[in-house]
Image: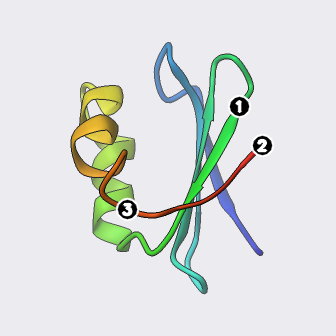
Amino acid sequence: MNMVWDRHVSNRIREIGYDVKTRTMAIVFADKTTNFHAPVPYPLYASIFHATFPERLYRQAIEGQVPLVSRS
């Protein structure tokens, strides 16, 4: 996986990453747990990264709707 990472997204989300090839999005939370979701379209990843409230958009659009590939 070749991820592109954006850091310091919000208080709860420390980092958000995206792999264009596999359409996998990684979310690193403040407690250092990482969730990998796939498939995530690039526009959805970009909207979460640029959102004023990324945690809310993550809960509404990704959590429970896009399959969780792995958690670490």
> Nearest the camera: 10 or 24?
24
- Going from N to C along the chain, the mark reached first, 1 or 3, is 1
- Horizontally, residue 7 falls left or right of residue 50, namely right
Quarter of the N terminus within the rendering: bottom right
Which colour scheme appears in the figure?
A: rainbow
- Going from N to C along the chain, the mark reached first, 1 or 2, is 1
Amino acid carrying mark 1 in the image: Thr
On the image, the x and y values in percent for residue 38 come to 50, 70
Judge whether 70 appears above or below 39 on screen. Answer: above
- Horizontally, residue 19 falls left or right of residue 2, namely left
10 Å crowding of disc 3: few (<14), some (14-19), many (20+):
few
Indicate which disc residue 33 carries: 1
The reply to whether discs 1 and 2 touch (Cβ–Cβ < 8 Å) is yes
Amino acid carrying mark 3 in the image: Val
Q: Tell which residue pokes out farthest to the top in this image.
A: 11
What residue is disc 2 on?
72
The reply to whether discs 1 and 3 touch (Cβ–Cβ < 8 Å) is no
For image coordinates 51% across by 77% down, the residue present is: 23
> Nearest the camera: 69 or 54?
69
For image coordinates 24% across by 27% down, the residue present is: 52
Secondary structure at badge 2 equals: loop
Q: Gap in Å between the C-alphas at discs 2 and 3?
A: 17 Å
Judge whether 48 appears above or below 13 on screen. Answer: below
Secondary structure at badge 3 equals: loop
- Horizontally, residue 56 falls left or right of residue 62, namely left
Judge whether 29 appears above or below 5 on screen. Answer: above
On the image, the x and y values in percent for residue 11 come to 50, 13
Indicate which disc residue 66 carries: 3
